[in-house]
Amino acid sequence: MTDNARQKCGTIAIVGRPNVGKSTLFNQLLKKHLSPVTYKPQTTRYNIKGILTEADCQMVFIDTPGIHKDYITPLNRILNRNAKSVLLDADLILLMASCRKWTGQDQEIYDIVAQGTAPCILILNKVDLLVNKQDLLPLLDGFSKTHNFDAIIPVSALRSSVFENLRSEIVKHLPQQPFLFKDGEVSDRDRKFIIAELVREKIMKYCHDELPYAVHVQVELLREKAKILEVTANIWVNKPSQRVIMIGAGGSNLKLIGTAARKQIQSFVKCQVYLKLQVKVKKSNADGQMLSDIYVR
Ligand code: GDP
């Protein structure tokens, strides 16, 4: 590590409307699958900090839940408050949008960002979906005339090279200050939290309608024995009818969720995982009675 005086360190908030690719970018930047990524909006429910430490720079990325306008529930209100407070605290903001469409919601987020003082880079994502690559130049030109971004960078967050495209522009905007986290720390969240989020990601993927939004996942037990990590996670739902959907006919849905989640957890913890999922109903079973179990090896 170089001397402290030359160290750069700062928080970088990744913001944007749901589904533009924030979690995908976050995971690419961190080279770890930390934040849930699915095709469904509103998957990210919490702010997760991912820490990337290099010799003379520490980047603390914050993946924020999207800002919601159309569908305001008490949960969304908390998410909004959360996302806005992240914006105020960040040293740099990466505003993500799809290169295919700038929507009213993108503009609203830009307006919130513009009220603050932090520099803001527009990340125009999903360039791989542009049929005509020549459309990109006029698009960049248009944004530089109508908006006040510190930089505009087109990327595809799916590509592993995305960090190389962004790195120097990010480092440029970070303040010189000592590192906030110890070398080797990858997240401010513990393993239980990240594993619960990985299970929730698979629930979002395999459950339809509004069910996933009623679900809370809690990792009850993590135990390492003979190089196998034993994980017990509770999936809490609100009603017995939701438990039935979650489990599926003959346990088929829970089996799908469990198999996919186990693979993802294995790639995160880098060892074999034995996953036990328990579906429990929150309200009707105040005593926490277990309603169903499934084991996935
Ligand atoms: P978030 O809600 O903003 O965090 O969005 P996600 O990261 O969950 O991504 C939403 C969807 O867009 C997922 O299906 C991603 O695989 C997809 N996605 C993200 N980045 C790209 C990209 O660069 N190109 C394409 N084609 N799809 C992407």
Image: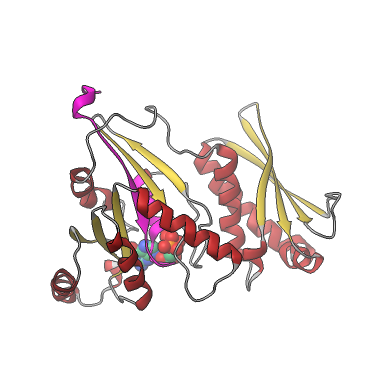
Q: Report the residue at 65% width, 51% height from top.
A: 217
Q: Is residue 259 left or right of residue 270?
A: right
Q: Quadrant of the C terminus?
A: top right
Q: Quadrant of ligand 1?
A: bottom left
Q: State whether residue 37 appears in this view.
A: no
Q: Quadrant of the N terminus?
A: top left
Q: Is residue 193 left or right of residue 64?
A: right
50 or 164: nearer the viewer: 50
Q: Report the residue at 48% width, 55% height from top.
A: 82
Q: Is residue 12 magenta?
A: yes
Residue 95: percent from the left, percent from the top?
Answer: 31, 61
Residue 187: percent from the left, percent from the top?
Answer: 45, 38
Q: Report the residue at 39% width, 31% height from top.
A: 181
287 or 265: nearer the viewer: 287
Q: Report the residue at 63% width, 34% height from top.
A: 229
Q: Is residue 24 magenta?
A: yes
The number of callouts visible is 0
Q: State whether residue 113 appears in this view.
A: yes
Q: Quarter-wise, where is residue 110 in the image?
A: bottom left
Q: Is residue 234 left or right of residue 148?
A: right
Residue 250: percent from the left, percent from the top?
Answer: 79, 63
Residue 236: percent from the left, percent from the top?
Answer: 72, 55
Q: Which residues are magenta?
A: 1-29
